[in-house]
Amino acid sequence: MLKEMIVATLLNVVAPVVFVIGVAPGPAAAQVRTASSVSAQASPSASRPGADRSTAVQDRSSGLLIPLRVQLVISRYDGDRKISSQPYTLSVNATPKTMPPQPARLRMGAEVPVSGFVPASPDGKPPVGGPVQYKAIGTNIDCFASPQDDGRYALDITVEDTSVYASDKAVPGTMANSGTPVFRSFKLTNTVVLRDGQSAQFTAATDKITGETVKLDVTVNALK
C-alpha cells in the first residue's frame, strides 16, 4: 500500500514536468521557421536555375574599375619621311556606366615670351618693343575609358598640341625677319574602340602651311 502511494505521488509530480518540457520546443520551432523564411525572402534568386551565374555577370558589368595603360604617339611626316615622334603613356581606369568617369589628364609644356611692337612714329623713329606676353605651348591630353559588353574598351580622347615653327622656315602670311614667333596648333576629339593589346591609327591630318602630316596612333593594354 505504501509503495503504491509513493508511485502515484511521483507520477503527479513528474507528469507536469514532462508536459512543460514538451511545450518548450513549440515557440523555438516557430522561431526557426520564421528565420528560414526571412532568409529565403532575402535571396529569392537562390531557387532559380542559373541565378548564381547571372549575378556574377551583373557584378562584373557594374563592379570594379579596370586599370588600363594607354599609349599615344604623335608623329609628323614630311611626305613619307618621319621627322618627329612623341610618345605619351597614361594610366586610365575604365569605369562602367554605373560609376562616374575617371579621366586621365596630362599637361606638359612651357610658356614662350612674345614681345609686342609699338608702331613707328611719324617722325621716322623705328618701332620699339612693347609689352611682353606669354603663349603656352605643349601638349594636353584627356582620356576617358569605359568597358564594352564584347570585352573591348571605348577610349574618348582629346589631344591639343601647340608648338613653334622652326625659325629657318618661311611661313606664308607673316612678316619676314620680324623676330616674332609663329605658332601652330593641332587639336582633335574622337572615340576609338579597341581590344586589349590592340593598336590603331587614331587620325591623320595635313598642315596646310607646311604640308606636314600629323598622325596619332593609340594602343591600349589591360593591366593584370
Image (cartoon, grey):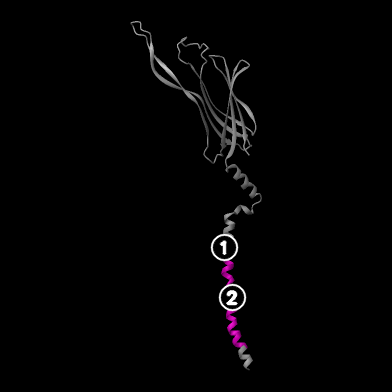
Q: Which disc, if any, is residue 21?
A: 2
Q: Looking at this rendering, what residue extends furthest in the top direction? A: 124
* Mark 2 residue element: helix
Position of the N terminus by quadrant: bottom right
Which numbered disc, 1 or 2, marks the residue that appears first in the sequence? 2
What is the crowding at mark 1: few (fewer than 14 residues within 10 Å), some, or many (at least 20)? few
Question: Does 25 lie within the magenta span?
Answer: yes
Q: Nearer the viewer, residue 98 or 69?
A: 69
Question: Magenta part of the protein: which range?
Answer: 7-34
From the viewer's perspective, is the residue at label 1 or at label 2 nearer? 2
Q: Main secondary structure of the magenta part?
A: helix
Q: Which disc, if any, is residue 103?
A: none
Which amino acid type is marked by label 2?
Ile
Q: How many marks?
A: 2
Q: Residue at x 59, y 67 (%)?
A: 29
Which amino acid type is marked by label 1?
Thr
Residue 114 occupies quadrant: top left
Q: Residue at x 63, y 53 (%)?
A: 46
Residue carrying label 1: 34
